[in-house]
Image: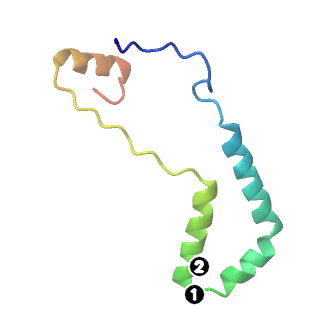
């Protein structure tokens, strides 16, 4: 049995927003904004390191985590030329 690549016929298009994730983030932002006074009161009663930890946890739910840059190891000269043409500012 041959393993042939299937042609993608469905699913989200590249760079499109995941609607479920967007809805959850909006709901979370709404809950945070409605409860901002209570949250601030709780934060004010925390010790410094606990307050920072809580703020980092909350922010991680709303702000996307950074993506590690992709490091390419180029050994073949033709690959190097290709990379120079694709990314002229990076590979000079």
Q: What SS does tag 1 mark?
A: loop
- Residue 37 is situated, as x and y percent measured from the top left of the image, at 80, 75
- In this image, 78 relative to 59: left or right? left
Is the image coloured rainbow, by chain, by secondary structure, or in one colour? rainbow
User: Is 3 above or below relative to 17?
Assistant: above
Q: Position of residue 60 (x, y in %)?
A: 57, 59
Q: Is residue 92 left or right of residue 32?
A: left
- Determine which of the numbered discs, if any, sits on residue 47 in the image: 1
Check the image and name the residue furthest to the right. Answer: 34
* Residues tagged 1 and 2 counted as in contact (Cβ below 8 A): yes
Name the image quarter holding residue 46. Answer: bottom right
Q: Where is residue 45, by image quadrant?
A: bottom right
Residue 81 is left or right of residue 11, and the answer is left
Side of 36 relative to 88 (left or right):
right
Q: Which mark is residue 51?
A: 2
Picture residue at 24% right of the left edge, 19% below the top? 79
The front one of 49 and 24 is 24
Residue 83, image quadrant: top left
Write the residue at 16% across / 25% down. 75
Q: Looking at the rendering, in which quadrant would you find the N terminus? A: top left
- Where is residue 13? Give x, y as percent: 61, 24
Q: Residues within 10 Å of mark 2 (few under 14, many from 20)?
A: some
């Amino acid at each position: 049995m041959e393993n042939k690549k299937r042609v993608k016929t469905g699913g989200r298009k590249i760079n499109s927003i995941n609607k479920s994730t967007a809805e959850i983030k909006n709901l979370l932002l709404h809950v945070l904004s409605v409860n901002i006074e209570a949250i601030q009161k709780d934060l004010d009663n925390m010790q410094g390191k606990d307050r920072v930890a809580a703020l980092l946890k909350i922010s991680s739910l709303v702000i996307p985590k950074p993506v590690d840059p992709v490091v390419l190891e180029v050994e073949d000269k033709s690959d190097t030329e290709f990379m120079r043409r694709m990314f002229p500012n990076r590979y000079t």
